[in-house]
Image (cartoon, rainbow, N blue to C red):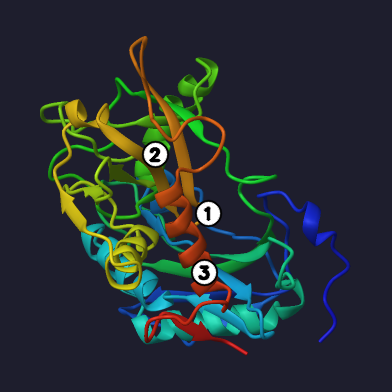
Amino acid sequence: MEKKDIDWSNLGFGYIQTDKRFVSNFKDGAWDEGTLTSDANVVISECACVLQYAQTCFEGLKAYTTEDGKIVCFRPDLNASRMKDSCERLEMPVFPEDRFIQAVNDVVKANAAYVPPYGSGATLYIRPYMFGSNAVIGVKPADEYQFRIFATPVGPYFKGGAKPITIRVCDFDRAAPHGTGHIKAGLNYAMSLYAIMDAHRQGFDENMYLDAGTRTKVEETGGANFIFVTKDGKIVTPKSDSILPSITRRSLMYVAEHILGMEVEQREVYFDEVKDMAECGLCGTAAVISPVGKINDHGKEICLPSGMEEMGPVTKKLYDTLTGIQMGRIEAPEGWIHVIR
């Protein structure tokens, strides 16, 4: 298989149209067989439920070329399960989890020429998503839905390495108690757009959202979970019913406890504790871990001991171990690496 003529080492994190995508439609109470298509356009009614009432959810995962030349995905079963949870919360029909994984396989195989080579730092980003497609004018769930998966080659989220970022404590709320913060709904991300652009205008890289109920506990950013390292080396992540259950975060916690032998804890993290942490990072599919060097609390700076020059030593060990597992350099726990070809 000949790879596409792409300058892999200089790819950005953006959309490049590839050859094939998967499409399946739900109508009359059932999903059709689905198909791979070269048509990248979506044609729907002007009154489609997704356009009127934002009835949509999505996932994100990657395909990699490992050191021994295989094309693999990382824990796609968890993406399928999380999308099931999102669909149920949004009154959408669940796309069967086994079919989800098969569709990911089919899309990656059909676009194998776009999977970047090992060592390039690039990957094939895979975006499954679903939306209400028929006309709905009264406020209610749609009757018809479309499930799609496209793929696009992307470069590393951080060019030249992951330098520590500066974030701010945000005055806006990301998710309400008992709301939709725990699922990957498009509406959650729409709500975060003003807040992240406002942060950028103020010179910050990201927002730290506190819990909406008391504004005393750390939740997450607009698109990543927090991971902290205490001064005695314990790994701590915030616990809340309105935090998205990050697959990367769950994997890092397992790596820390079962591979690196560290003590881990998922619990409520009060903002007052943050000043006493040794390291802080944001974890998610795109960058794996983004190190945080400073947190600005309305003009008062919290400077993490790990500094602004590079990842802290514990965060770096976690990052190197998880990416080593993903790329085939380190033996993976059973079931983590899904071989596509």
Q: Which of the two residues, 31 or 212, is positioned nearer the viewer here?
A: 212
The numbered dot on residue 286 is 1
Does residue 204 sit above or below 14 in this rendering? above
Amino acid at circle 2: Gly
Mark 3 vs mark 1, foreground winner is 1
> If you read the primary sequence from the N terminus, does the residue marked by circle 3 or circle 2 appear first?
3
Determine the residue located farthest toward the front in the rendered image: 232
Q: In this view, does 64 lie to the left or right of 318?
A: right
**Residue at mark 2:** 222
Element marked by disc 3: strand
Q: Residues within 10 Å of mark 3 (few under 14, many from 20)?
A: many
Q: Which quadrant would residue 252 be assigned to in this image?
A: bottom left
Looking at the image, is 100 positioned above or below residue 134?
Answer: below
The residue identified by callout 3 is 148
Residue, x 73% and y 61% (percent of image)?
Answer: 17
Image position of 156 (left or right of 140): right
Q: Distance between the residues labelled 1 and 2?
A: 13 Å
Q: Which of marks 1 and 2 is nearer the N terminus?
A: 2
**Going 65% across and 61% down the picture, which residue do you hit?**
41
Identify residue type, mark 3. Answer: Arg
Q: Which residue lies furthest to the right in this view?
A: 5
